[in-house]
Image (cartoon, rainbow, N blue to C red):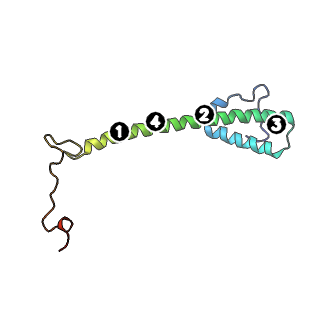
Amino acid sequence: MNPEQSIPADDPNSAVGNLSYEAARDELVSIVTQLEGGQLGLAESMRLWERGEALADHCERWLDGAEQRLAAGRGQRSAGVAHADADRRPEGVGESVPGADVGEGVAEPLVGDAGAEGVG
């Protein structure tokens, strides 16, 4: 928003919901610059402040919604990846072996193994 542009006197928050995120952010930056300049009267400063608050709320809602959509997308993608990984798993990997008891298949130490008898 250029300093020459005026905000409607009747509703400083008019049509904020219709603005894109970028348009709202740019207008908010302009308002902050004008307020920081300190050259405005009290009434105009208050109108700009109210408009800035509405713009900031709009931007925050937009960003919150974007964050939720991204989180939902990551959740769907994670679920899809886990499912796809299970489909690509080689046969037998991640499956229990029928009839296998705990301890079966444990290797016995080899004769002459350095850890079994020591060096001698």
Locate residue 38, reporting x and y percent. 84, 44
Question: Which residue type carries mark 4?
Answer: Ala
Question: Which residue type carries mark 2?
Answer: Arg
Q: CA distance from mark 3 to mark 2?
A: 24 Å
Location of mark 2 (residue): 61
Question: Which residue type carries mark 1?
Answer: Gly
Left/right placement of residue 9 relative to residue 79 reads right
Location of mark 4 (residue): 72
Give the foreground label among 4 and 3: 4
Locate residue 7, reporting x and y percent. 77, 32
Q: Residue at x 75, y 32 (%)?
A: 50
Q: How many marks?
A: 4
Location of mark 3 (residue): 45
Location of mark 1 (residue): 80
Instruction: Between residue 74 and residue 107, name the one nearer to us.
Output: 107
Q: CA distance from mark 2 to mark 4?
A: 16 Å
Q: CA distance from mark 3 to mark 1?
A: 52 Å
Q: CA distance from mark 1 to mark 4?
A: 12 Å
Numbered disc 2: secondary structure: helix
